[in-house]
Every structure is written in structure tokens, then in C-alpha cells.
Image (cartoon, grey):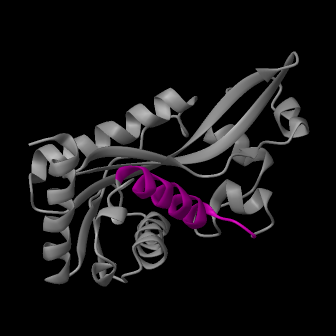
């Protein structure tokens, strides 16, 4: 079977399954804001892109947080998320439609001789179509914040000393945006973007009646 034909058949099978009871997603986290963000991302995709609202069941799985705070660099963040999602897939097999992990991370880029620091969220989705990644918008950490760390390790604990923000109040993103954005919205955006990549070209294959 050619690649396009195989993807088309997978999409049709998925639609048949979803009509029977909705989407079942297992998430490598039991944090409430991550669960809500992943659900928001799935709902937005099926409502706005597919044009067919679906019941979304998010099943959380507890995962130990890595010591040392947020991963430093996109590569480390992506690796951590992928390991968590792959562990769920290996453990649970075909019990769920999708296996998801979502992680925030810190990234440094040197531009025009200046070190710029960003915080953003990455989501990886594993499923019958393979895997795909999505990222939220990047938020620059204010240079004066970085300067105030006095050479301290740029981790979650160090940043939190300068930017108060608890998980319940939306975390660092909420603090930096005065509550306009939070970790839930960042997770939702990265999840939506991952789904767009995962299903690219599939929705066009469906008759409008199924969309």
C-alpha cells in the first residue's frame, strides 16, 4: 500500500473509532493545568480544523518531575517529552488513541552578541499516524531578570526567585504576562500545533459530511 493510501485508510479507521465514543488520550502528567491544556488543544483541532466536535477523555499518568527544574535547551526538552510519551506507549500498547507528553523548557540564543533567554512549551503526540511535535509561543525572559541572577544556574528555582509564580496561578508564563497567558494556554497551543502537523493532509481526504 502506498504511503498516501495507508494514511487515508488510517484516517478513516480513526473516524470510525471516534464515532463510537470519542477520543482517548493518555498524558504523561497528572498536573491539572497540563490535562486541561491538552484537552483544549484537541478540542480546538477537531472543532476548528476538522469541523466535528468530539468527546475528549484525558487519562493522566503520574510521572516524576526531573530534578533541577526546567530543561535547558529545546533538545533536552524534546528528549524528555519523547521519553515520557514513548514509555507510556511501551507500557500501554494500543489501549489509547494517543500518547502525549508536554514539557516546558528554557532556551538560550545568541543574537548580535547578546544572550537571549526564552521559555516555551513543547508537546509530543504519538499515535497510529506516527509522532509529531508542537511548540507554544516563545516568551523572552527580561534581560534585567537574567542579569539579577548573578551567574546562578538558569533553572526553574533560580527564575522563580525573581518571578513569583506558582503552578496554581499559572506559573512563570502567567507571572510574566500579568495573567493574560498561563501554562494551560501554552500547553493548548503546543498540542494544537502538534495535531496540525500529525494530521496534515488527512482532513482534506475526508468527505465534507465526515468533517
Q: Where's the N terminus, which quadrant?
A: top left
Residue occupying image coordinates x 88% and y 18%: 112
Of all residues shown, which one is farthest toward the right?
A: 144
Q: In front: 93, or 164?
A: 93
* Image quadrant assignment for residue 43: bottom left
* Image quadrant assignment for residue 131: top left
Q: Is residue 171 left or right of residue 45?
A: right
Percent of width and height locating residue 192: 48, 61
Magenta segment: 180-198
59 in relation to 156, above or below: below
- Looking at the rendered structure, the number of numbered marks drawn on it comes to 0
Residue occupying image coordinates x 43% and y 44%: 133
Q: Is residue 114 left or right of residue 20?
A: right
Q: Is residue 200 left or right of residue 70?
A: left
State yes or no: residue 184 in magenta. Answer: yes
Residue occupying image coordinates x 75% and y 60%: 175
**Residue 152 seen in the current view:** no
198 in relation to 189, above or below: above
168 in relation to 117, above or below: below
Percent of width and height locating residue 65: 41, 45
Percent of width and height locating residue 140: 77, 42
Residue occupying image coordinates x 78% and y 42%: 141
Q: Is residue 161 left or right of residue 34?
A: right
72 in relation to 183, above or below: above
Q: Where's the C terminus, which quadrant?
A: bottom left
What's the magenta bit mostly, secondary-structure-wise?
helix
**Residue 207 seen in the current view:** yes
State yes or no: residue 31 in magenta. Answer: no
Q: In front: 177, or 96?
A: 96
Amino acid at each position: 500500500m502506498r504511503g498516501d493510501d495507508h494514511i487515508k485508510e488510517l484516517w478513516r479507521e480513526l473516524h470510525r473509532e471516534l464515532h463510537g465514543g470519542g477520543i482517548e488520550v493518555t498524558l504523561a502528567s497528572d498536573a491539572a493545568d497540563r490535562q486541561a491544556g491538552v484537552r483544549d488543544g484537541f478540542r480546538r483541532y477537531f472543532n476548528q480544523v476538522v469541523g466535528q466536535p468530539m468527546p475528549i477523555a484525558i487519562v493522566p499518568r503520574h510521572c516524576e518531575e526531573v530534578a533541577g527544574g526546567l530543561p535547558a535547551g529545546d533538545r533536552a526538552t524534546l528528549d524528555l517529552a519523547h521519553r515520557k510519551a514513548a514509555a507510556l506507549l511501551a507500557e500501554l500498547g494500543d489501549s489509547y488513541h494517543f500518547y502525549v507528553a508536554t514539557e516546558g523548557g528554557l532556551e538560550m540564543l545568541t543574537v548580535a552578541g547578546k544572550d537571549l533567554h526564552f521559555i516555551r512549551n513543547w508537546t509530543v503526540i504519538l499515535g497510529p499516524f506516527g509522532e509529531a511535535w508542537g511548540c507554544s509561543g516563545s516568551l523572552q525572559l527580561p534581560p534585567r531578570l537574567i542579569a539579577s541572577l548573578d551567574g546562578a544556574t538558569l533553572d526553574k528555582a533560580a527564575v522563580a526567585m525573581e518571578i513569583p509564580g506558582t503552578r496554581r496561578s499559572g506559573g512563570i508564563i502567567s507571572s510574566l504576562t500579568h495573567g493574560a497567558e498561563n501554562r494551560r494556554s501554552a500547553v493548548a497551543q503546543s498540542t494544537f500545533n502538534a495535531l496540525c502537523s500529525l494530521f496534515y493532509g488527512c482532513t482534506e481526504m475526508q468527505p465534507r459530511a465526515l468533517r
